[in-house]
Image: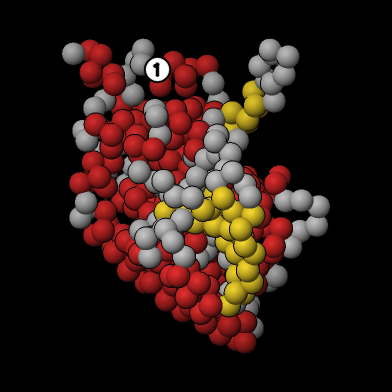
């Protein structure tokens, strides 16, 4: 049983450290550089070290665990109510300790090196997609100034190329050259995106968990990698509904006086996994995919009485709960409709 809890307000160069007993009695306050902080923590007896969950928190969590400390990460929004009056580094470090000592407090699981590496690959592809979208929109805007309206989407690049290569085009030569340069940049971004997509597909085939998730309709390599990179161990959730709530796929509550008031989805969780699950759910509700939905099933009944987007959110919630069950039980996907018929 460790006797000391140390709250650390992380920064680039200067760290604020607040030490207290498990009863809340202050033992020390320190303002340390990165080098001083590492040496200071190495000299401390094994303690409970608490960081706010931020960009470098997982790295420092691994470093502190190697020194024999027990590490906990806490979400910044749970620390904020415990800051006294003015906000500064010392007050933040103290608030971290006060918040972490609450018996009902929830903590964030530090990411492993492999998880962070997968997250970097995923974010890199997302960044390239955003950059390519920006280039496509710039190209469409340029052509719009000369009376050419191009629909949104990367699929209409061929139409833009045809306009630029038209023998009797009214576009000035300078504009055509600039547009062709934008097309070259778009092609380069597309090649990089495809390269990362191949890496993601390869990584998603290496682990049993990722392969198992892809047996579910609407879940591909991108979703499987996102779950592996951003989600904590599924054993931390008591049930699949808790995982869906962590993703923000449950209604926002504003209940009082025993009266339940539910609104739109809370969006209070991991945005990347939530977005990919909703996209996968929408793919299962296209006109062609609807033909494979058995009559009388839950999904068919929902589609008969609810808007498609609402059904997609409900289906994404169901998919999240199924992913939890598949990973906890280490089983592949089983179609509920076929299982009920059997």
Is 152 left, or right, of 45 in this rendering? right
Dot 1 falls on a residue whose secondary structure is helix
- Way the structure is coloured: secondary structure
Rendered residue at 42%/76% (across/down):
188
Between 288 and 93, which is closer to the camera in this rendering?
93
Query: On screen, 32 above or below 208?
Result: below
Rendered residue at 35%/64% (across/down):
66
Residue 194 visible in the picture: no
Rendered residue at 18%/13% (across/down):
342
Q: Position of residue 44 (x, y in %)?
A: 46, 65
Q: Position of residue 226 (x, y in %)?
A: 39, 51
Query: On screen, 326 above or below 126?
Result: above
Between 285 and 53, which is closer to the camera in this rendering?
53
Is 29 left, or right, of 285 in this rendering? right
Query: On screen, 52 above or below 337?
Result: below
Is 271 left, or right, of 213 in this rendering? right
Dividing the picture into quadrants, the one containing residue 90 is bottom right
Q: Position of residue 295 (x, y in %)?
A: 34, 15
Between 205 and 36, which is closer to the camera in this rendering?
36
Between 278 and 31, which is closer to the camera in this rendering?
31
Dividing the picture into quadrants, the one containing residue 81 is top right
Q: Which residue is mark 1?
A: 298
Residue 226 visible in the picture: yes
Q: Position of residue 208 (x, y in %)?
A: 20, 46
Rendered residue at 48%/27% (across/down):
314
Count of numbered tags: 1
Q: Is the residue marked by circle 1 packed among few (<14), some (14-19), or many (20+) residues within 10 Å?
A: few
């Amino acid at each position: 049983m460790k006797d000391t809890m140390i709250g650390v307000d992380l920064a680039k160069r200067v760290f604020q450290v607040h030490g207290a007993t498990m009863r809340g009695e202050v033992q020390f306050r320190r303002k340390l550089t990165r080098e001083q902080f590492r040496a200071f923590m190495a000299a401390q007896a094994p303690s409970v070290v608490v960081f706010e969950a931020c960009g470098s928190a997982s790295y420092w969590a691994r470093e502190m665990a190697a020194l024999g400390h027990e590490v906990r990460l806490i979400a910044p929004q749970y620390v904020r109510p415990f800051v006294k009056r003015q906000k500064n580094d010392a007050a933040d470090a103290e608030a971290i300790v006060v918040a972490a000592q609450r018996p009902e407090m929830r903590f964030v699981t530090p990411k492993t090196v492999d998880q962070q590496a997968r997250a970097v690959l995923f974010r890199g592809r997302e960044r390239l997609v955003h950059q390519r979208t920006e280039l496509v929109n710039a190209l469409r805007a340029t052509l719009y100034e000369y009376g050419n309206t191009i629909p949104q989407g990367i699929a209409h690049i061929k139409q833009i190329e045809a306009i630029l290569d038209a023998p009797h085009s009214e576009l000035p030569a300078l504009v055509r050259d600039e547009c062709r340069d934008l097309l070259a940049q778009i092609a380069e971004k597309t090649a990089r995106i495809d390269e990362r997509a191949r890496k993601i597909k390869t990584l998603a085939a290496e682990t049993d968990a990722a392969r198992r998730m892809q047996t579910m309709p609407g879940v591909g390599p991108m979703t499987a990698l996102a779950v592996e990179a951003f989600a904590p161990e599924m054993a931390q959730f008591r049930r699949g509904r808790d995982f869906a709530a962590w993703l923000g796929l449950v209604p926002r509550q504003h209940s009082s006086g025993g009266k339940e008031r539910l609104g739109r989805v809370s969006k209070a969780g991991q945005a990347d996994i939530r977005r990919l699950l909703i996209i996968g759910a929408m793919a299962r509700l296209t006109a062609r995919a609807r033909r494979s939905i058995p009559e009388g099933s839950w999904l068919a009944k929902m589609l008969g009485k609810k808007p498609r987007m609402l059904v997609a959110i409900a289906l994404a919630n169901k998919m999240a709960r199924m992913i939890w069950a598949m990973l906890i039980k280490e089983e592949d996907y089983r179609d509920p409709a076929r299982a009920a018929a059997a």
